[in-house]
Amino acid sequence: MMTTPSIQWPEGKKFAFTIFDDTDAATVANTGPVYALLRDLGFRTTKSVWPLEAIAPPVVVGGADCADKGYRAWALQLQEEGFEIGLHNVCCHHSTRDRIQTGLERFEEIFGHPPRSMANHTGCRENLYWGPDRVTGLHRLIYQAATFGRKGGFKGHVEGDPHFWGDLCKERITYARNFVFPDINTLRACPWMPYHDPLRPWVNQWYASSEGGGLESYLETLKEENQDQLEAEGGACIMYAHLGKFFRRDGVISDRFRFLMERLSQKNGWFVPVSTLLDYIVQQRGPLTLTDKDRREVERRWLWHKLTRGES
């Protein structure tokens, strides 16, 4: 098993922290104040978007997209302020290859470059290596048994399928998220990241995240003792979050969220977007290709978390 890499963070920083924010349910009204708080505290994170408007009912949940002029202007403002804009599929529902290509082109038109980082939107048929295809061998069989075979049907990586776009991903996107772990130190939970997996060739490099899809899980992962642990270990945290879902209720940002982010901001951390952080790890450590042994280990770690906690 690979040991946790020892990274010397720039500018004498002791650890690194960022967020990949899935855009589910996000609007300017419910998420804008959260980003204003992050900006004022010195965090620069990654905000994903849907570049295309919905033309069908959303899968799981919808939200604002870049066809909305106000939302698009706000996303561009975030980019100007130093936040990264990533991709959460091209819209909130299933998309075929032609529409995915249009969405990637639209993203580049708006933001001036292709998306560097992405995360699959749960349930979309065009998801890459999702459901049982996230794992291999015995782990795949266990996953299928635990989910009663209901989590399949993802075809983004299957050549010839109408939802295939693996080659477009490989051409344009550097980093894609897969496994999520309960450990605040994402780099300890997945010391291989970012990595290339030869069994999943359409993704250039994979990264992992720390659990925070709901408000309670986010607050649990980021609690005081975990922050101190992250700092002491000199680690790196990439939080998985839905900032548009839970962090501003009834017009008010969660007091606990505000407190924990303020506390974290006072530590000597490197607070940069996801791609900036991953680029730096590659620069310091070099590129990494997953071995069969490494793959079994990272899948085992994630599957245990998935089966015992039911998280992402």
Image: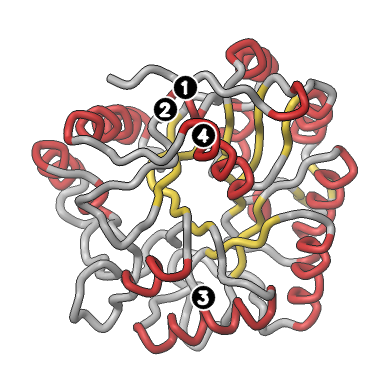
Residue type, numbered disc 1 = Pro
Residue at the far right: name it. Answer: 40
Seen from the viewer's position, the closer of residues 96 and 193 is 193
Mark on residue 109? none
Circle 4 residues within 10 Å: few <14, some 14–19, many ≥20: many
Q: Earlier in the sequence, mark 3 or mark 2?
A: 3
Badge 3: residue crowd in 10 Å (few <14, some 14–19, many ≥20):
many
Residue 310: give x, y in percent of width and height: 36, 37
Q: Nearer the viewer, mark 3 or mark 2?
A: 2
Of labels 1 and 4, earlier in sequence is 1
**C-alpha gap between disc 2 and disc 1:** 6 Å
Label 3 sits on a secondary structure element that is loop
Give the mark nearest the N terminus, 2 or 1.
1
Secondary structure found at label 4:
strand
Q: Amino acid at mark 4?
A: Ser
Q: Residue 301 occupies which quadrant of the picture?
A: top left
> In this orientation, which residue lies closer to the viewer: 144 or 233?
233
Pointer 1: what residue? 5
Of the numbered discs 3 and 1, the one sitting upstream in the chain is: 1
Q: Are marks 2 and 1 in contact (CB under 8 Å)?
A: yes
Whole-percent x, y for residue 210 in the image: 51, 34
Q: CA distance from mark 3 to mark 2?
A: 31 Å
Q: How many marks?
A: 4
Disc marking residue 91: 3
- Any mark on residue 191, and which? 2
Earlier residue among tags 4 and 2:
2
Tag 3: amino acid = Cys
Q: Residue at x 43, y 60 (%)?
A: 120
Image depth: mark 3 or mark 1 in front: 1
**Residue at 79% of width from left, 61% of height from top?**
78
Q: CA distance from mark 1 to mark 4?
A: 17 Å
